[in-house]
Amino acid sequence: MVSPARKIYLDGPRPDIRVPMREISLTNGSSVVLYDTSGPYTDPAYTPDLSRGLPRLREAWRCAGGGTQLARARRGEITPEMEFVAVREGVTAEFVRDELAAGRAVLPANVNHPESEPMIIGRNFLVKINANIGNSAVSSSIEEEVEKMRWATRWGADTIMDLSTGSRIHETREWILRNSPVPVGTVPIYQALEKVRGRPEALTWEVFRDTVIEQCEQGVDYMTVHAGVRLAYVPLTARRKTGIVSRGGSILAAWCLAHHEENFIYTRFRELCEIFASYDVTFSLGDGLRPGSIHDANDEAQMAELRTLGELTHVAWEYDCQVMVEGPGHVPMNKIKENVDLQMELCSEAPFYTLGPLTTDIAPGYDHITSAIGAAMIGWYGTAMLCYVTPKEHLGLPDRDDVKAGVIAYKIAAHAADLAKGHPGAQAWDDALSDARFEFRWEDQFNLSLDPETARSFHDETLPAAPAKTAHFCSMCGPHFCSMKITQDVRAYAEKNGMAADEALTAGMREKSKEFAERGGRVYLPLADG
Amino acid sequence: MVSPARKIYLDGPRPDIRVPMREISLTNGSSVVLYDTSGPYTDPAYTPDLSRGLPRLREAWRCAGGGTQLARARRGEITPEMEFVAVREGVTAEFVRDELAAGRAVLPANVNHPESEPMIIGRNFLVKINANIGNSAVSSSIEEEVEKMRWATRWGADTIMDLSTGSRIHETREWILRNSPVPVGTVPIYQALEKVRGRPEALTWEVFRDTVIEQCEQGVDYMTVHAGVRLAYVPLTARRKTGIVSRGGSILAAWCLAHHEENFIYTRFRELCEIFASYDVTFSLGDGLRPGSIHDANDEAQMAELRTLGELTHVAWEYDCQVMVEGPGHVPMNKIKENVDLQMELCSEAPFYTLGPLTTDIAPGYDHITSAIGAAMIGWYGTAMLCYVTPKEHLGLPDRDDVKAGVIAYKIAAHAADLAKGHPGAQAWDDALSDARFEFRWEDQFNLSLDPETARSFHDETLPAAPAKTAHFCSMCGPHFCSMKITQDVRAYAEKNGMAADEALTAGMREKSKEFAERGGRVYLPLADG
C-alpha cells in the first residue's frame, strides 16, 4: 500500500524558501497538512549521508550587516528565517517580526548551524517540545545519539538538547549538529566540568567562556546557563527535601560554596551576552534551583532565582540577545499557574521553557505521564516550549523507545494546549480524525493519528482482517451493535423526519422540553406527540 | 529477597471490622501505609478459590431494619460500612455519615454483594478510579474477565464495571461479582438489548426492568442508566461531528425515535428508584449524550441532558437512593472546569463520575495519556471518581497489559488530584519517595512507586549490578558526577558553615541579596564576603 503520508513543501515569498510539511491523503479524497519537524530525511528525493551532513539551507541567508534575529526585528527587518517561520506557522511575517522584537518569541538560529530549518518559540505560536538526548560516562555511543536525534525529530521534536557528559562530548555534538534539521541546545557547564575532570571547585570563568565559544563556533543554537544560582540563594535550598536537582545548578552551587564567591556566570553575564550576540545564540536561562519534588515546589529558593532570571533577561536584551527562561520541575497542579504568571511578570513575557512539570513523585517509570499532565496545563497557561520527560526519568538514560514515548506524550500535551488556547487551525486535526472515526474510515483514523503504526496494530490485535478496516463496527461493541452505527441511523431517521434539518421543528421540540421543565418535568407525564 | 510490601489490617471500632492496607517497609527502618484495593488475594494467609468466591465479609452486617446507606445516614445511623470506610480514609465515622446524608458521597454496597470491601466515593475523600472490563461478541472469555478484575484491583482500581456484551453476560457477571473485593457496576441496557437480539426498537420497559432486577439480585453495586436521553434532546445531536458515542445513549435514542416516545427509563424512573432502593443499588446517571470529540464538547445536547440528570438526582433522593452522575468524554482543557461547576450546581453536589475527559482526539493508541491529563484536572476541580481509559480506547478491547496501563495512568491522575486538593496525607507518599530518591535508597524508591517492577527494571537496564542499588549515583550522570551527591555536599558544607543551620546568617545573606537588588543588582558588583 502506498503511504498516505507525503512530504510536501509550501512556497515562501522567495524561491529559496520552501517550507516542509506532512500531507496526509484521506480515503475520502480530502487531505490534511501537518507541521513537520522531520527534516530532509523523510523526503524520498533526499539521500542521507551522515558524514556529509544536511544541506546548508540557511547559508545563503547570512546577513552581511550581521545582528541577531532580535536586533534585526527591532530594526523592523524581516529576515528569510522570519519568512520561513511565517509560512510554517500560517501567520504573517510582520507578526513574527513583531513578536520577536517584543521579546515574546525567540528564533534560535546560530549563524554556524545553517542546516537547521527555522522555527519559532513563543506563546502566540504553536506550543513546541524539546527532546533531550546525549550519552553519559556509563552508556551510549555517538551513532546511537545521532539516531536518537533523527528518531525524536521524526516523531515531532521541535528542538533537541545534547546533554552528553563523559568523553567525546565535542565529537558527539558535531555529528548531531551537522545532521540536525532542528535547533540544538546544550548546557555548556557540563563540558566545562569534564575539562576540569569533574571537580566543580576547579571551574573558572575562563574555562567556561572558552567552552561556550567552542560550542558557539560549532553552531549550538541555544545554551542553558545557570546564571541565577547565586551564592546567597544556596542556603535557601539546604532544608529542601531534594535540595538542588539541576546538575548545572548543583555544579555552580558547589563552586560558589567552595570559593565563597558569587556565581561567575552571574558576575560575567555581560561578557557572555557579547559572545552570544556575535553568533546569535539564544539564552535559555536555566532554573538551577528548580524543585525536585512536590514538597519543594514554588519555594523561596526557586522564586529568588526566578527574580534574578528576570533581571538577567533585561540585561541580555540590552545586547540584542534572544532569551528563553526555564521553569520547573516537580509542581502539584494547584501551583502550576503561579509559575507561569510570575515568570511572565518577572521576565517581561520572555518565552517560558519548562521541564514537565511532574504533578506527583510516586510514579517512577511513568514520569512521561505524571509530567504530560503538568506540561499540558502549563502550556495552556502560556509556556512556549515543553521539555519532554521520558519513562526513564530518575531511573536511567532513555533508549530509542523511551525517546519515542516521551515525544508522543509531549506532542499530546502541546497539542492539547494549542486546543485549549484556541490556536487557529489546531482543531482541524482533531476534527479530521473525529470525522474519520465517525465514518468508520479506519485507515484515515490510523494515518491521522500521532502514531499510525501503534493505532493500526492495536486495532489489528482484535480485528486483523482487512475487511474490518472498512466494517461499520469495531471490536468494542461487535458486529451486532455499534453506537456509531446507531448514531448514523439516528441521524438518518432524524433527517428523514426533518427533525434535524427542520430548524423550526427542532426549535419546537426544544420549546416542548422547556415547557416540560416549567411544568416541573414530572416524570410520569408522557411527552405529547412532538 | 523478602517482599517489602505486606498486607496489614487496621482495627476498626469492632472486632469484625478489619481494614486492609498495604505496608511498605523501608530500608531506613520506617514504613509507609497505603490504601489497598487488592482484596484478600494479596493476603498470604488466604487461599483463593474462584468457584467458592470471596468471604462474605458484609453478610453479618445486614440490617434488619433495612434501608439504604443514605437512608440510614439520614437517620443519623452509623453503619459498619461507614465505620470501615472511616478507618480506610482516615476520617471520623460521623464525617462519613454526614457526607453520605448530604448526598455528597456514595457508598455502593448492594445487600447481595457481601464480598465487597466498603469504599466511599465523594469529593471530600480520596479520588477513586474505575476500571472497565467485560467481553464482547468478538473476543474474550469469562476466565479472562475475572482475571482482569483481579489484575485491575491489584493495581488500584477502586471499582470495576462489567460491560460485557454478547453471550454469557449473566454467567460472566456472576463469576466477577462472587470474586470481586470492590463494588461492581454495570450498564443493564446492554444485557436488555441482548435479550431482544440487538434490536433497540424491540426494547420495552418490562424487559429492561426485569434485567435490572436480575442484576440487583446478583449483587451489582451500581448501575448506569441513561434516563436523561430524552426524545427532545436527540435532534440536538444530529449536527454533531460524532453524534451519540455512548452505547447506552444511542440505544435509547434509537428507541425514542423508533417509537417517537419519551425514553421509558425517564418516564418509569420512580419505579426504578423503588427497585434500586430495595437492594441499595447506587444510581450512576449516565451521560448518554456526552461528547465524542473535541468539536462536540459542552454543546447543547450535553448540557440539556445534564439538567435532566440534576432533576432525576432529586427524584432518586426522594427514595433514599444513592446517586452518582456521569460526565464526559472528550473535552479540551479550557472547557473542563465548566463541566464540574455546572454538575455541582445542577446536581446539588451529587458525586461526579467522569470518563477521562480526553483532551485531544489525535492520539488513538495513547488515550490513557490524552485522558489522564483531563482526568487529573477534573479530579482536582472536584470529580469524585475517574473512569479509566486504556491505550486500546477507540481501537479494541483492553487486554491485561492495557488494563494495567489504564489503571496506572489513572492512579497517577487521581493522586495528582489528591495532592492539588491538599488532601491530608496524600503528600506523605510523595515525600517518602522523594526522601528515598534523595538519599539514593534505590530499593525504597522502587518499592514506593506505583509500579515497582517497572521502576526496578528500567533502572537495571542501564545499571543492573546490585551494588548500583546503593551507589550514590545513577546512570543519568554517571559515577564522576551526580547532582544529588553534590547537593548533599552542598548541604554538608552549608551546615558546616552554619549557613543553613544559622538562621541569623541565612537572613543576613538574604539581606545582602536584597540590598543587591536595591542597588540595581549591577552584575559587575561582586558580592562582599557574606
Image (cartoon, coloured by chain):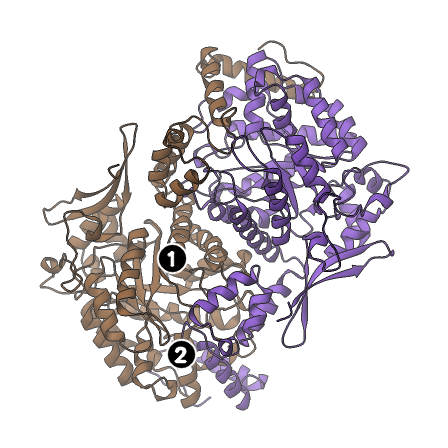
Chain colours: A purple, B brown
Q: Residue furthest toward the right?
A: A64
The spot of residue A104 in percent (x, y) is: 71, 43
Q: Residue furthest toward the top?
A: B529
Q: Check chain identity for marks 2 and 1: say if they share one.
A: no
Q: Toward the viewer: B470 or B10? A: B470
Question: Along the horizontal axis of the image, is B398 left or right of A82?
Answer: left
To which quarter of the image does residue A251 belong?
top right
Say what secondary structure mark 2 lies in: loop
Question: Along the horizontal axis of the image, is B164 left or right of B259?
Answer: left
> On screen, A505 above or below B90?
below
Parent chain of label 1: B
Mark 2 vs mark 1, foreground winner is 1
The spot of residue A383 in percent (x, y) is: 61, 45
Q: What residue type is labelled 2?
A: Arg
The spot of residue B421 in percent (x, y) is: 41, 45
The spot of residue B145 in percent (x, y) is: 29, 65
In the picture, the disc for residue B401 is 1
Q: Toward the viewer: A280 or A305? A: A280
Mark 1 surroundings within 10 Å by alpha-carbon count, few (fewer than 14), some (14 through 19), many (20 or more)? some
Say what secondary structure mark 1 lies in: helix
Q: Can residue B255 be seen in this view?
A: yes
Question: Along the horizontal axis of the image, is B200 left or right of A352?
Answer: left
Q: Which amino acid does label 1 sit on?
A: Asp
Q: Residue at x 19, y 52 (%)?
A: B40
Locate the C terminus of chain B by quadrant. top right
Mark 2 surroundings within 10 Å by alpha-carbon count, few (fewer than 14), some (14 through 19), many (20 or more)? few
Q: Residue at x 41, y 61 (%)?
A: B354
Parent chain of label 2: A
To which quarter of the image does residue B392 belong?
bottom left
In the picture, the disc for residue A519 is 2
Q: Toward the viewer: B252 or A51? A: A51
